[in-house]
Amino acid sequence: MSATWAVVLLAGAFTMAFKAAGPVLIGGRALSVRLEEAFGLLAPSLLAALVVTQAVAEDGELVFDERLVGVGVAAAAIRLRAPLILVVVLAAVSAALVRWLF
């Protein structure tokens, strides 16, 4: 088994143990409202961090290029409540246009 597969299996086992620890530790007790609100913000904040990392990082350096334009257009389209497929198309087209023009 290679080191890569060992890391993948270890990460999977840790994830399963971490998810199982929640119900075991809480044991049917209700969480406080404040903690529930904090948990509700975890997924969007992690998604935002992944998007920003993919949009402005390359080889360990900050890179501001057409990808950032696509993210900005997507954010504006989401703010205007556009359908998801339209958001994706607008982001791709705007990034492609900026890449083509510059």
Image (cartoon, helix red, strand yellow):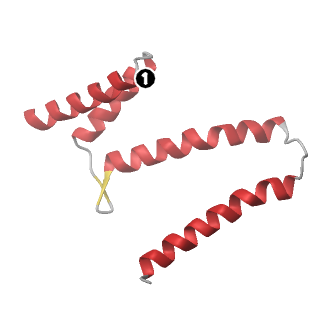
Q: Position of residue 46 (x, y in %)?
A: 54, 46
Badge 1 element: helix
Which amino acid type is marked by label 1?
Ile
Tell me if mark 1 has few (under 14), some (14-19) or many (20+) residues whose alpha carbon lies within 10 angstroms of its own. Answer: some
**Nearer-the-camera pick, 17 or 67:** 17
Give how far across and how far down residue 79 sits, in percent.
Answer: 45, 20
Name the quadrant containing residue 91: top left
> Which residue is at 82% across, 35% downward?
33
Which residue sits at x=40%, y=19%? Answer: 83
Relative image position of residue 84 (x, y in whole percent): 40, 25
Q: Residue at x 67, y 37 (%)?
A: 40
Look at the image and tell me whether residue 55 can be seen: yes
Residue 67 is left or right of residue 47, and the answer is left
Image label count: 1
Instruction: Look at the image and tell me in which quarter the N terminus lies.
Output: bottom left
| Of residues 7 and 38, the one drawn nearer to the viewer in this rendering | 7
- How far from the left and from the top, in percent, is residue 62? 31, 53
- Whether 90 is drawn above or below 96: the answer is above
Q: Which residue is mark 1?
A: 78
Q: Is residue 98 above or below residue 42?
A: above
